[in-house]
Image: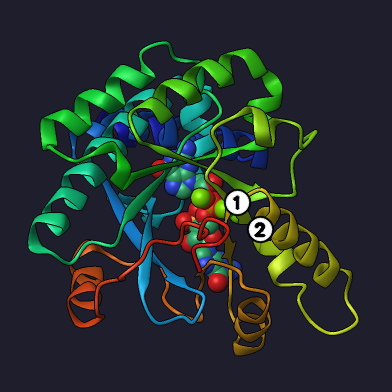
Amino acid sequence: SVKNDTRGGYAFYSSNMNSQFSQHLDLEMGLRRALTNHEFVIHYQPQYDTQGLHVCGIEALLRWQHPERGLLYPGDFIHLAEEVGLIGQVTEWILDTSIRQMKAWVDEGIAPPRIAINLSTLDLKRSNLVDEIIDSLDRHGLPGQNLELEITENLIVQDINMATQRLNALARHGISIAIDDFGTGYSSLSYLHQLPIHTLKIDRSFVQDIDPESTGRSVVDAIIAMGHSLDLTIVAEGVETQEQHAWLAQRECHGMQGYLFNRPMPAEELQSILKTSRPATHSMIAAPAGEE
Ligand code: C2E
Ligand code: MG
Ligand code: MG
Ligand code: MG
């Protein structure tokens, strides 16, 4: 095949750099084919309530079932997809696929309140993003209230006016916005009350630092306290130990996500978890003052 010929050609140069270059090229060509060949898959990771009993949300995480290299993770290819201008199509695919899946779970009566999808910094720059999302919700008959979009602080800082405009448009359709990896980006914090933010996801690096004597504790403490006072929902990502869970629960962190509970998994596996766990009677929304 053409592909093998190309490989042979590059193999002529034995330097590391050239082999990396050819791998990169392979990956880029592969990425272009992955969409048409249906090689992308979604793994879903549940988010639990404070007590760790009910599934309160789901995060959709992209994987690429590469025909030769096996299962690839976003860290292996998302950056490239952004670089070569394919991220828009990838986002459109994961949005549409997870919205369709969520609708099926809603219809079965086993869906938690929300499914979250990660957006790339480049996505919010596209003027058609909002329409694309609304069209997909309409097409599948899923209310915006069931959708959450995860963005990073960097995106907001890059263009606050554009972010404000897009996020307000999404919020008008009931869609929630979560700040992913909170605490790791450049942020002024002032955007927190300017923008329709619903959820802060405490970055895994802080959560993994939760042990006695560590500074991670004070950071997480501060984020949770701020979240409570601003009426934001706080979700801790990367919860791996009982100790971390207990400590977070004591501080009334609203949601937890991590290997302690479940790894991200294919839809069928999550489905059986959703069927056996009683559906959440409440979402993770912080109870308005006086309503507890
Ligand atoms: P993220 O949104 O912060 O997602 C959390 C990452 O932590 C996921 O890695 C998840 O598998 C992993 N994780 C969850 N629980 C634990 C835990 O207890 N311990 C550890 N060590 N890790 C845990 P993953 O799936 O490799 O995704 C990495 C990043 O790639 C995501 O970070 C997100 O920024 C990005 N990403 C994933 N899916 C998409 C997508 O569809 N579009 C875009 N643009 N980015 C995506
Ligand atoms: Mg995320
Ligand atoms: Mg995150
Ligand atoms: Mg993270």
**Some atom of ligand 3 lies within 8 Å of the CB belonging to the residue at label 1:** no
Q: Which image quarter has ligand 4?
A: bottom right
Count up the numbered dots. Answer: 2
Q: Residue furthest bottom?
A: 242
**Quadrant housing residue 238:** bottom right
Q: Could you tell me residue 292's position as x and y percent?
A: 51, 69
Is disc 2 in contact with disc 1, using a CB cutoff of under 8 Å? yes
**Residue drawn at point x = 51 percent, y = 81 percent:** 260
Question: How many other residues sit within 10 Å of disc 2, few (<14), some (14-19) or many (≥20)?
Answer: some
The secondary element bearing badge 1 is classed as loop
The colour style of the image is: rainbow
Residue that label 1 marks: 231
**Some atom of ligand 3 lies within 8 Å of the CB belonging to the residue at label 2:** no
Q: Is residue 32 above or below residue 259?
A: above
Residue that label 2 marks: 228
Query: Tag 1: residue type?
Result: Asp
